Image (tube, grey):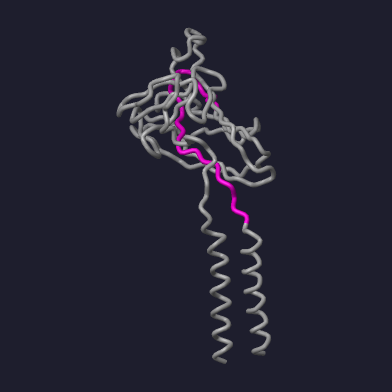
Amino acid sequence: MENTMQLRKTILAVSALALSAMAHAAPTNLIVNGSFEDLSSQSGVQQLNNGQWSVYSSLPGWTTVWGDGIEVRNNVAGTAQDGKHFVELDSHYFANVGFVGAKQSNSAMSQSVATTSGMSYTLSFWYSARPNTSGMGADTNDINVFWNGQLLSLLHPAAVNSTSSHQWAKYSFNVTGTGVDIVKFAATGAQETYGGSLDNVSLIAIPVPEPESYALMLAGLGLIGFSARRRR
């Protein structure tokens, strides 16, 4: 009986070790500059102090697809969800010379990401309606989210934000890699420079247990079954 109990303890320990190895593989965020903290760009101010903002045609990891550019803020009309900076895509008209006077404040930004073809990933980010937009239409904060040109979601708040701070909400989508994939965010609401905000974008592979971990776990479960049959 004592040997059987010791065997069961050993089996359970091996199985737990296998499960732990599967669960604790450190996730890697494939999105570059997902919280928009790196401003080392040739298209705008290199550092934003508290209360400042600027518009960029590109940022490390991100490129303007169309519109006036990527507006980055540091504690302006709300605070970041992660770090100091966050993005608004209903940017100021004057940012891009080609759009001066055209009132094309809505912008889109994208990032190309290297993935493993056929692998599943979780695309996550935080979104908020702009604070103090209660006097505007609900669509002023709308943003479309795309994966390889396919619309994943229209971010449309149930109500405009009447508070003085962001009301951040996390959104997550399961997507499949093709080898090289494009994540795109595009403002689609009213063009009056008051739009929704984005922060803390991530793309993380959904973990697939290694064959060795599976083998350890299955071997442990098999031995538990064998031990139970012997006891009967």
Where the C terminus falls, by quadrant?
bottom right
Nearest the eye: 165 or 182: 182
Image position, residue 47 (x, y; %): 35, 26
Residue name at image x 67 percent, y 82 percent: 226
Image position, residue 197 (x, y; %): 45, 31
Q: Magenta stretch: give its range.
A: 186-208
Residue name at image x 58 percent, y 87 percent: 4
Nearest the eye: 140 or 79: 79
Residue name at image x 39 percent, y 21 percent: 54
In the visual, does 49 lie left or right of 18? left
Q: Is residue 200 magenta?
A: yes
Residue 146 against residue 27 in the figure, above or below: above
Q: Seen from this angle, which residue lies furthest left?
A: 50
Q: Seen from this angle, which residue lies furthest bottom?
A: 1
Nearest the eye: 170 or 27: 27
Residue 52 against residue 209 in the figure, above or below: above
Residue name at image x 65 percent, y 43 percent: 116
Q: Quadrant of residue 30?
A: top right
